Amino acid sequence: MRLRLVLDDGGELELAAEVVQREGLRAGDPLDEGERARLFEADLSWRAREAALELLGVRARTRRELGARLRRKGFPAKVIEPCLDRLAEKGLLNDAAFARAFARERLRLRPRGRGMIARELFQKGVDGETGERALEEVFRDE
């Protein structure tokens, strides 16, 4: 939910309700330009996180894929990188888990050789070492 704050100078500031609550904003609180800028950045970070969670709700993605999608949505790098870091810290963005799941799915639904799957993982942004470890595990298990 978004809230529109009407400021004493006649200006308006639209923020996520979660940002307003987290910041403890109340009617009559003074907001100088610095505070407005800080709130705008907090809201931008919140919107990036929401967009990332929506994208991850559709399917798992690599860090590179998710970053590229957020850039296409117009979010700046200074917001994207911390957002991706927080998602990774919470276990919601994990290239190694993505690589294992992707390789298992490929073997099950569209069987391909190890080299082809490795190339696909690389194209999706999985680094070579992470991809090789995932492939080793999946091919050993399968």
Image (cartoon, rainbow, N blue to C red):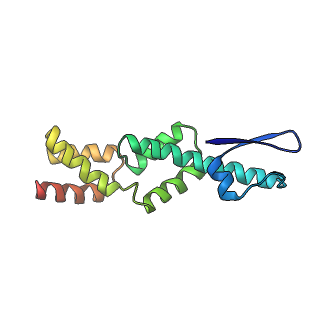
Q: Position of residue 10 (x, y in %)?
A: 87, 39
Vertically, is 12 above or below 64? above
Position above or below: 24 against 107: below
Instruction: Kindly tell me whether residue 112 is visible in this rendering.
Output: no
In the picture as drawn, the residue positioned furthest to the right comes out as 9
Image quarter where the N terminus lies is: top right
Quarter of the rendering containing residue 9: top right
Image point 83% across, 44% down: which residue? 7
Q: In the figure, is residue 64 to the left or right of 118? A: right
In the image, farthest residue toward the bottom: 89
Q: Nearer the viewer, residue 133 or 57?
A: 57
Q: Nearer the viewer, residue 15 or 84?
A: 15
The residue shown at (84%, 52%) is 28
Tell me where residue 73 sits by quadrant: top right
37 to the left or right of 79: right
> Which residue occupies 21% across, 48% down?
103
Q: Which residue is the extreme one toward the front?
A: 27
Q: Position of residue 18 (x, y in %)?
A: 62, 51
Q: In the picture provided, is 23 more to the left or to the right than 1?
A: right
Q: Give me the residue at 48% from left, 46% from top.
A: 52
**Relative to the observer, which residue lies in front, 23 or 27?**
27
Q: Position of residue 2 (x, y in %)?
A: 65, 41
Q: State whether residue 71 appears in this view.
A: yes
Nearer to the camera, 25 or 37: 25
Count of marks overlaid on the render: 0
